Amino acid sequence: PTTIYLKDYRPPEYLIDRVDLTFELGEEETRVRSVLQIRENPAAEVSGVLRLHGEQLELIALSLDGRPLQATEYQVDDEGLTIQQMPAQCILESDVRILPQKNTALEGLYKSGTMFCTQCEAEGFRKITWFLDRPDVMSRFTTTIRADRIRYPVLLSNGNPLNEIQTDDGMHQITWEDPFPKPAYLFALVAGDLRSIEASHTTPSGRDVALKIYVEPENIDKCDHAMASLKHAMAWDERCYGREYDLDIYMVVAVNDFNMGAMENKGLNIFNSKYVLASPETATDRDFQGIESVIAHEYFHNWTGNRITCRDWFQLSLKEGLTVFRDQEFSADMGSRGVKRIEDVRLLRAHQFAEDASPMAHPVRPDSYMEINNFYTVTVYEKGAEVVRMQANLLGSDLYRKGTDLYFERFDGQAVTTDDFVQCMAEVSGRDFSQFKRWYSQAGTPELKISSDFQPEQQRYTLTVAQHCPATPGQPDKAAFLIPFAVGLLDKNGNEMPLQLQGEAEAITGTRMLEVSERRQQFTFIGINERPVPALLRGFSAPVKVQYDYSDEELMFLMAAEPDGFCRWDAAQTLAQRILLKRVATPDAEIPAGFVEAFRKALTDRESDQALLAEVLTLPSESYLGDQMKEVDVEGIHRSRESLKRHLALTLKDELLSLYHDNYSADGYAPDAVSIGRRSLRNLALSYLIQLDDPAVLQLCIDQFRAGQNMTDVLAALSLVADKDVPEAEQLLEQFYQQWKNDPLVMDKWFTLQALANRPDTLSRVENLMKHPAFSLANPNKVRSLIGAFCSGNAVGFHAADGSGYQFLGDRVLELDGMNPQVASRMVRIMARWQRYDKQRQQMMKAQLERILKTEGISRDVFEIASKSLE
Ligand code: HT7
Ligand code: ZN
């Protein structure tokens, strides 16, 4: 496979102003007729040769300005169509045959169950018809869909519906027109027997927008939360960014077979049903929150992605980083801001920091790729969001808003770059962002080494900050970053100290945003009359690792007194991590009484945000702990974490039980922040208590399962029981299966639960479950919930010393790759960090990667990940 470089970007030689598509959807094949209005791009040097993208298209007819083209006038190959002598402008018509029923890659037009749907980002449109399938070619689309009236009563595409025609042959056809020019990756089509719920929204300018959510008939009663979320998102974007919706209709369609979470096609979002369907009985709190955030994310793309899109795919974070930042802030406003920030940081640290430390590390704006689908990563999305957040932090909210206003005004209707976005921030603030832009071009997680020096005689306190960023593939040396570093200083009573840097006229109270721009820098605070405890990186103001030599006592002090939720949580995590890692090496190392006391204090605190407490009381995950070790000790980490949980449960049994009972609520289910917090704290208590191997606790779980109040509580209870070697484990799993076997999303949970079970026979159970009638390798949700959950969520099982987990994953990758390369490539990524393990495991994982690479005909997707993992 060839590598594509950012430095090779050239504007397109031709533009396509209008596209007229006609689809005839059939049970054997689909015909796509396209009429393209093409002209030379005045801004480019034109060669006279037109090269259109196209894959897996069977040519039926081709004509230029009404004249059928002779075989000598064009060439078709595996990747496209070349027309040698192009006029300056023309109408190109084509007629092709495609086979959506055979499309298991779920890219382009495919069938999901009985419905047709599309997925065109990033380069799927070329599997529908020949086109300039690149985001800087924006066209106006008209789409006519013809299909069987009974099988496909609902026919949808982007924009507004024009007319419907019924024909005598049992078919019908509808034409849709999208008035907004858009790149082909935002094209969408849906056909099926669907039901919809409808609502409406009036924008500040007075436009009435019809909101419709389409689902399969049996799911019609599970759409209300998605609809409420959509309305909240629309109002939020109007309020916080001054952006309103621009078409008369906004449609969301839920499909069961989908490679990712959802897709922001103009006016016609297509969603993985996981991010639409919810009822208290079938969806957990996490599902409800996921729906709210993904519905909002796709809606926000209408401005950040659709109206202003990316010039090329290297700029992906322009739309994704910005839109993730927007959805994070939206969710923070809808629920608990502090908890949301912690969840986002947890995700970033667990996955993005790990990616940055792996052979797959790449900048937020990558400079090369083989397969763009491999670059929809936590770096482009989540680190990209942090990079936008840092700009908002550096500017403050008013200037940031001015910056985005300018961005929307200047670039509406265009395909632009991350530099264009930053330029707006620079212009409104009058600041120079050239150093800041290294966040886009340099990969790796910067590390800040901090030391402090208190000089009581001078009443001075100096923080020395040294920054370093480890080498990443292709980037051995990094230039210094500009890092917004939020700090506060606490006195012995836990009060904020006034902060006045040397040379400044006055002090401020609260958080100070230091700007670290050099490799080593000192910040001296004056008027400091006692040794403070520093609160560092408040709000996680930059995606960096901080090293500071806190004493255990200082960490406990921060856990109790620090006003910033992130820092309070981080102190608890650091302390727990210290104890856990010490006990990996020395299993009976003492557990400081102060730590247990801090836990007790948190457990009995009924005043603070309960959701925040649940975060504070959650121990760092096994995989995060592994990341902190030189060489990951899978079993040691597991043992250490389990034994600390048991110790806490033994010592704090009464507190945990009261917490469990005090947080019971007989009220109906509501996914609001307070209720979610109570449920998560209660279920966390149960997860500690189960460590006691006490029949009474097992009974609590069984009772909670049987009470069946909501899926959050049912699943929490079931997952604890399923880990145990007790007869009830099988009984409850069977009962759950019988109750939910017809609900695919609940079955996903059932698979995951068993894949994560902490039992010696989990792999063989997973292998058996692959043969279960509810499982299908063709459905990405099933693959993720069984195979993905086992390989990336069950460290002890996957990293079994005999290599069986690796062999299993290798087999699955090869099996999947023939069907769905995007999903296969996500799976192979799990082995990208093989160097982090001991020699034997390294050898075994490497052997699997080599086996995959040697297999003939593997996809570009899998090739890129496997080969880069071995470099
Ligand atoms: N913009 C979308 C990214 C995407 C995608 C979605 C579904 C299937 C395949 C896909 N490839 C890329 C999703 C988003 O970020 O909103
Ligand atoms: Zn997105």
Image (tube, rainbow, N blue to C red):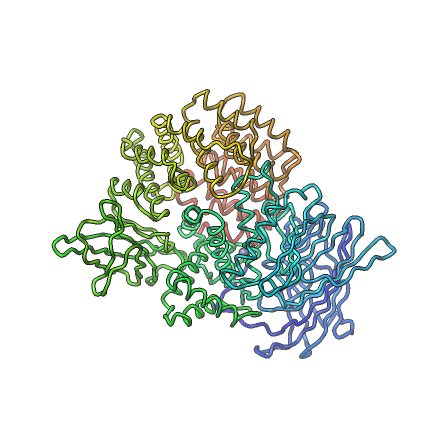
Tell me which residue sits at (51%, 37%) in the image.
790
Q: Is residue 50 above or below residue 674?
A: below
Q: Report the front residue among 374 and 673.
A: 673
Would residue 864 be found to the left or right of residue 166 on screen?
left
Would residue 381 be found to the left or right of residue 154 on screen?
left
Number of marks: 0
Q: Position of residue 302 (x, y in %)?
A: 58, 61
Q: Residue furthest right?
A: 168
Q: Is residue 782 above or below residue 68?
A: above
Q: Report the front residue among 690 and 518.
A: 690
Q: Position of residue 100 (x, y in %)?
A: 71, 52
Q: Quadrant of residue 176?
A: bottom right
Does residue 570 show up?
A: yes
Would residue 641 be found to the left or right of residue 57 on screen?
left
Q: Position of residue 405 (x, y in %)?
A: 49, 68
Does residue 837 show up?
A: no
Q: Report the front residue among 635 and 643.
A: 643
Tell me which residue sits at (22%, 45%) in the image.
492
Tell me which residue sits at (73%, 59%) in the image.
58
Q: Is residue 74 above or below residue 799?
A: below
Q: Position of residue 726 (x, y in %)?
A: 51, 21
Q: Residue furthest left?
A: 457
Quarter containing the N terminus: bottom right
- Ligand 1 occupies quarter: bottom right
Q: Report the front residue among 480 and 266.
A: 266
